[in-house]
Image (tube, grey):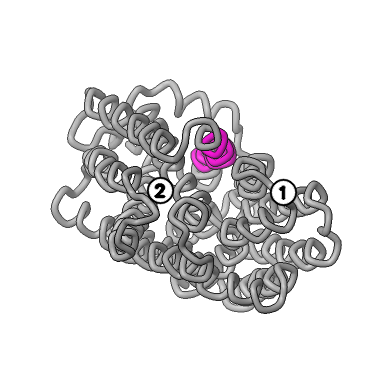
Amino acid sequence: MLAIAVTALTSGSIVYSGVSVLLPFWKNTYHLSAATAALAATAIQAGPIASMLIIGRAIDRYGERWVVSLTMIAMGVTAFIAAAAGRNYPVLLLFILVMGAFYGSILPGGQRAITRWFEPGLRGMATGIRQAGLPIGASIAGAILPAVALHHSWTAAMIVQGAAGILGGVVFASFYRQTGDATTSARKTPVNLRRLILGLVRDRAVRSLLIAGLALAAFQYVFSVQILIFLNDHLRIPIVTAGFMYSVAQAAGIAGRIGLAWISDRFWPGMRMRSLKWLLAFSTIPITALSALTPGSPRVLAYTLCTLLGLLSVGWYPLYLVQITDIAPQHAVASTISFAITLNQIIAATMPPLFGALVGATGYTVGWLFLVVILILTATQLHRTQAAPNPIASQTS
């Protein structure tokens, strides 16, 4: 079941992360600014904002098998249509938005599967392994899609994305089963979303956790969306080489998603808030170093920083996701996850173009340092949150 969940997220990530990979090609094809090109990343990230709460509620009511599989197939078909009809950039953005809306089922549906099949003591590691599917897919996208787009066309690359999405949906429908822990079986009563959300945001520790998720989402998506343009435009690194660097960063994120969750649970069990605080603080160091790079900087330094930033910007998510899962009522696991992810998606959709606009006005040094300030402030507020060693354990009692 874990392998099936990983496969679904990996194939979905090829579609989702592949949009960021193709940004430089759309930027050149349509003669766009960095901020305008980033609207494609905004579109794929904005799609789940509109759909995820609805999809999460459907998963809690009907189960994850068919909701996830059918939306993945629909996502792949939409990619095919975008490749055929998206010659105009605004039209392309519309199809990418729809792709993102269908993608909204994969994260809550997959985590619902982890909750169903794994006891609490194993969920951290299982989530880390499952969430490794996202950087695996992004790494595959970074390694394959630029070469396909360069030697054929970006429309051919989108066909590859669509095939990956359909394949993941077929695999999930064919092999996933909704048995497992009887205490987490699908409930038929619809979730009261308003009551659930109010209960979450009224708690100070939960609010602090959600704010940390927003800052880390900004870090992750600014890096993933802008790094290829930064490497290619600012550092003058060839696009295929930059795509390989992006792939290396995502591969490091695979280790981060598994390793950081294991380290936290091994050395600070039940203290994921503390782990997130230190991850926020430590991430400021490589971002600051990245801001100092110039076209004459050694290539190995760019590789090193991309690898470290990939590990951190991707690796934080299982820690956050398991902590969110722990606070969720048993009848509303997918809905709670969907709410947290929806907030993250709002930041993921808005921050890359805002970062691009800031870069256009001031340059990359100011842009990266602005991100550093956000992380420092968030780590500080997380540190100041008065809580028990496991600050939201009371939410699960």
Q: Residues within 10 Å of mark 1 (few under 14, many from 20)?
A: many
Can you tell which mark lies on residue 321? 2
Q: Name the residue at the right extreme.
A: 85
Can you tell which mark lies on residue 97? 1
Where residue 389 sits: x, y (%)?
18, 35
Q: Is residue 342 magenta?
A: yes
Q: Is residue 222 magenta?
A: no
Eyeballing the image, is 326 above or below 88? above
Camera-nearest label, 2 or 1: 1
Where residue 379 sits: x, y (%)?
27, 32
Eyeballing the image, is 362 above or below 237? above
Q: Nearer the viewer, residue 368 or 248?
A: 368
| Upstream in sequence: badge 2 or badge 1 | 1
Counting every numbered tag in the picture gives: 2
* SS label for mark 2: helix
Q: Nearer the viewer, residue 3 or 236?
A: 236
Residue at 28% across, 56% down:
261
Residue at 32% across, 52% down:
312
Instruction: Classify residue 157 as left or right of residue 377.
Output: right
Is residue 125 among the parts visible in the rendering?
A: no
Type of amino acid at the residue the image marks with label 1: Leu
